[in-house]
Amino acid sequence: MLKIADQQFSSRLLLGTGKYPSFEIQKEAVRVSESEILTFAVRRMNIFEESQPNFLEQLDLSRYTLLPNTAGAKTAEEAVRIAKLAKASGLCDMIKVEVIGCDRSLLPDPVETLKASEALLEEGFIVLPYTSDDVVLAKKLQELGVHAIMPGASPIGSGQGIINPLNLSFIIEQAEVPVIVDAGIGSPKDAAYAMELGADGVLLNTAVAGAKDPVKMALAMKLAVESGRLGYLAGRIPEKDYGIASSPEEGMLTT
């Protein structure tokens, strides 16, 4: 089970809800993914306007935990304000902290992320900060008391997959809270690789929503996360420089 704060989840795939071609495709992709945690940008939803279309109305919300995020925030103050708006709407006490520091790369601002996380922890939120693959930053966020670390595999929406597996491995190795790889996942192989490295979960959106067939890709990602987790638990063989016969040489017939 994936445990975040006092909550437990069977699925280790967290799914974003933006940019789908239609509500119908979005709903079916969510269903086949079997994801239990759905994330969305608070600033992109009219959560108080009943006349506006809302994907939340398409789902049985009793089956999901909602993870609002602070996408669009450029400062800690903005992120805290967005988080409080989400909480006031009754959505969830869990928040993905996202404070962007570079408009071109969409990489997070480490200083403002730390400040926002600290403030939201004091407010009683379950805090999941989105970060770069900075090993020291991940450690400092844990020292603050965040409930999970969410390092990006590569820039948001880039589909480049895991570009720095070494840093991710360091983050996972030192982690005392769940590590959920977030951003940049492009294909099922990326999701499986993240889980094989020992990540506790994967969060993705564009890789599914932007696929030619989002529903099939959602299923593929579900299977990839499960496969990668099983591979990690099974323990892979060590890599070697030279070939080794797969059959024992002892007892072979001689000619």
Image: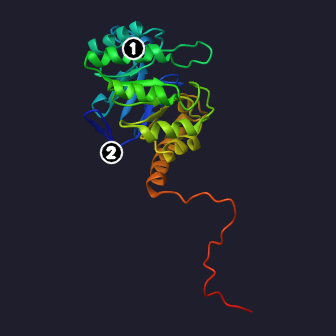
Question: Percent x, y for residue 48?
Answer: 33, 9
> Mark 1 belongs to which amino acid?
Lys
**Residue reaching furthest to the right:** 255
Task: Pick the quarter of the image with the N terminus.
Answer: top left
User: As shown in the figure, which amino acid type bears the numbered disc 2?
Assistant: Met
**Looking at this view, is 249 or 43 the one in front?**
249
Find residue 9 and report its image quarter. Answer: top left
Q: Assess disc 1: are there few (<14), some (14-19) or many (≥20) residues with their C-alpha within 10 Å of its C-alpha.
A: some
Please name the residue that numbered disc 2 is placed on.
1
Q: Earlier in the sequence, mark 1 or mark 2?
A: 2
Q: Is residue 157 above or below residue 49?
A: below
Kindly check if marks 1 and 2 are in contact, taking CB atoms under 8 A apart as contact. no
Per the rendering, the mark at residue 115 is 1
In percent of width and height, residue 152 lies at 52, 29
Q: Residue at x 43, y 17 (%)?
A: 113
85 is higher (above) or lower (below) than 150 = above
Image quadrant for the C terminus? bottom right
Q: Of tags 1 and 2, which is closer to the observer?
A: 1
Can residue 142 be seen by looking at this rendering? yes
Estimate the x, y position of residue 145 in percent, counting from the top left: 32, 26
- Mark 1 vs mark 2, CA separation in Å: 30 Å
Disc tally is: 2
